[in-house]
Image (cartoon, helix red, strand yellow):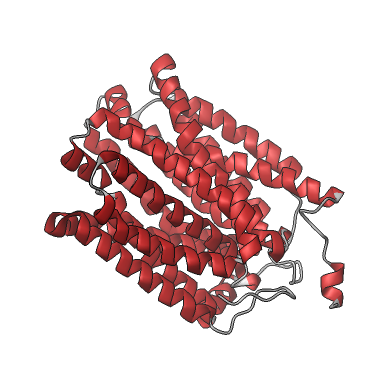
Amino acid sequence: MNRSLQRRPRLLSDSRSGRRLVVELAAAALARFVLNTARRFTYPFGPALARGLDVPLTRITSLVALNQGVGLLSPFMGTLADRWGPRVMMLIGLACLGCGMLAAAVLPLYATVLLALLMAGLGKSCFDPAVQAYVGARVPWARRGFAVGLIEFAWAGSSLIGIPTVGWLIGRFGWHSPFLALGLLAASSVVLLAMLLPRVPVSRDSAPRSVPAGQGWRLLVRRRPALGGLGYSFCFAMANDFLFVIYGAWLELDFRLPLAALGSVSIVIGVAELIAESLTAFLSDRVGLARAVTGGVALTAAAYLLLPVVARTLPLALAALFLVFITFEFTVVSANGLFTELLPDARGTMMGAVGATGSSGRMVGALLGGYVWLWGGLAATGCVAAALSILALLSLRWGLRGWRPPSRMMEIP
């Protein structure tokens, strides 16, 4: 056996270091749950914020758009994670969230709410590439899928627990109460992670020194696996938003679903996300992350094509949506685990670039999705989403040609 493999700690096993690492990952997942809830609660509760601030709803939706635009900063924040270490950027991201939310709680004005949402977006742009780089640095490849799946439980949790809790707070204590709660939780998360997370280099295989920003970008554009992953991220995210931006209008028009009942569809999506993240945690390492991602993309493309065929009644439509979001979320979360090893010398830069290309794809899909649906209905939406998913698969296969995972047990996608 290679001596470098012998010297690596056997993390996520039954050893003491493995148990400690699980605690670290759980704490990071809780912090990410707070970030995700802060980022997402303005979607369903925008009207409540507009009434509380006495402004038109369009001014709140403009804040949401600005919040999304901050996600394009992810590559630069990922580069800083390579330079300063993921722990520092995770703490900075949570501190940004806490300062913004507490400012809006103390001075509940439109300007401070604008600041709070911008700081939430900035905090997520700092935190997400850093936590993924942290997982890549601390967790062996053989257990990478489990670790990423554990972190991603925070996404489904924000739908199933976080947003309903925000609704209860608004109903009980007023529209500004979530800002205080989220600010205090963010501050507590800073203290918790500062106590638990060790200072580790971004790559287990590299010396513990910072990576110059320019070097990270040069590595990114020269490595075919990294470029293939970015092409996949753009196309796959765009495909999903072609459906995501119109599914509410489709259900309302085709099945006369009341506007209030559309909110319950988010529960269906949240449960699908939770199941998908569980599958990633407990299945993807067994089949191999590369196989899991390529198989997941193919299944998602098939689900898009199946959607207009089977969605003849409301139960069948919801079941088809459930299938789409299980396959999509399983693929996305498994891909995050895979991408942590495509550029091990600059993990933060890689994961930040993945986040930015995904955000760009979602923006394009959101802009074009409505036009495609008006032109050809659900059939056109399903076909376009499937075609984009196939493009994502081709890009990924091209990037992974000749690539091998860092393990004695090689997997071929």
Up-down relation of residue 356 to residue 70 (above or below): below
Measured as percent of width and height from the top left, residue 409 is found at 72, 74
Q: Is residue 127 visible?
A: no
Up-down relation of residue 58 to residue 273 (above or below): above
Up-down relation of residue 383 to residue 277 (above or below): below
Q: Within the image, what quadrant is residue 195 found in?
A: top right
Which residue is more in the foreground, 379 or 219? Answer: 379
Q: Within the image, what quadrant is residue 350 found in?
A: bottom right
Q: Residue sitting at 59 percent across and 65 percent down?
A: 289
Q: Residue sitting at 73 percent across and 68 percent down?
A: 209
Given the current orientation, which residue lies at the most extreme top position?
172
Measured as percent of width and height from the top left, residue 110 is found at 33, 31
Q: Is residue 382 left or right of residue 191?
A: left
Given the current orientation, which residue lies at the most extreme bottom position?
402
Measured as percent of width and height from the top left, residue 39 is found at 44, 41
Q: Is residue 86 left or right of residue 325?
A: right
